[in-house]
Image: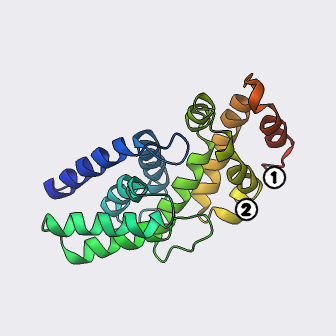
Amino acid sequence: MQKGLLDSIKEAEKIMNKVDDSFHGGLEHARKVVYISQQILASEPKANADVVVVSAWWHDTGRIIGNEEHEKRSALMASEDLENRGIDRIFCRQVYLAIAHHRYDMHPVTLEGTIIRDADKLALLDPKRWQNAIDDKAYHKFEHTINILPTLKNDVLRLKSSKDLYDKLLPEFLSYIRNINETDFMLQKQEILSLKLSN
């Protein structure tokens, strides 16, 4: 990976380190999305790996301003940062497109965007993400996510490799949920455990 891209990733890390959202964002979440993206990339040889990795780092940077429409804001922030570093405009556009449509109800227009969207949604199964929100007593952040969980594999995830990864991540997630003893989380715990989450 060229120096300009590595420097851009460092900038994204600085921004994500300032995003204060225990459930939806932050540096830990960005790292998880990068990691999951790389796992998906192993099964998607036609994807531009540099576009995917840079996009994974930048995908939630717009949350520094707010959660509403952060997808397009993040895409714009990333493409502007890359252009300012002299990165090819075509690459910048590919990064923009990979980030701009990563919300669960959006439809990415590129393979790289589909990888970012799938990786971001698979990060919903990250026990650390849930534990951070529980530690912060941010239970209100769970409602929307709990509603997405039953449709995650069959309706939200697009790539076969993502669905295979879901099957690998689900047992650890459910084990984590079963072992939560936080009194204030018991209703959500029961709701999650009653959902049909696998085929």
For the question of whether residue 184 can be seen, the reply is yes
Task: Say few, some or many: other residues with alpha carbon within 10 Å of mark 1 (under 14 / 14 to 19 / 20 or more).
Answer: few
Question: Badges 2 and 1: C-beta atoms under 8 Å apart?
Answer: yes
**Residue for point 41% across, 48% down:** 34
Please give the label number shown on residue 199.
1
Residue 24 image offset from top left, x and y in percent: 53, 48
Amino acid found under the numbered disc labelled 2: Asn
For the question of whether residue 46 can be seen, the reply is no
* Position of 184 relative to 145 (above/below): above
> Secondary structure beneath disc 2?
helix
Q: Quadrant of residue 134?
A: top right
Q: Is residue 169 left or right of residue 71?
A: right
Task: Say few, some or many: other residues with alpha carbon within 10 Å of mark 2 (under 14 / 14 to 19 / 20 or more).
Answer: few
Q: Is residue 95 left or right of residue 119?
A: left
Instruction: Return the residue nearer the eye: 157 or 133.
Output: 133
Q: Quadrant of residue 168?
A: top right
Q: On the rendered image, what quadrant is the N terminus found in? A: bottom left
Q: Which residue is mark 2?
A: 154
* Position of 50 relative to 98 (above/below): above
**Which sits earlier in the primary sequence, circle 2 or circle 1?**
2
Residue 43 image offset from top left, x and y in percent: 49, 57
* Position of 147 relative to 173 (above/below): below
Q: Quadrant of residue 112?
A: bottom left
Residue 64 image offset from top left, x and y in percent: 39, 53
**Residue for point 84% across, 36% down:** 190
Residue furthest to the right in view is 194
Cα distance in 3D space between marks 2 and 1: 9 Å
**Residue for point 61% across, 66% down:** 158
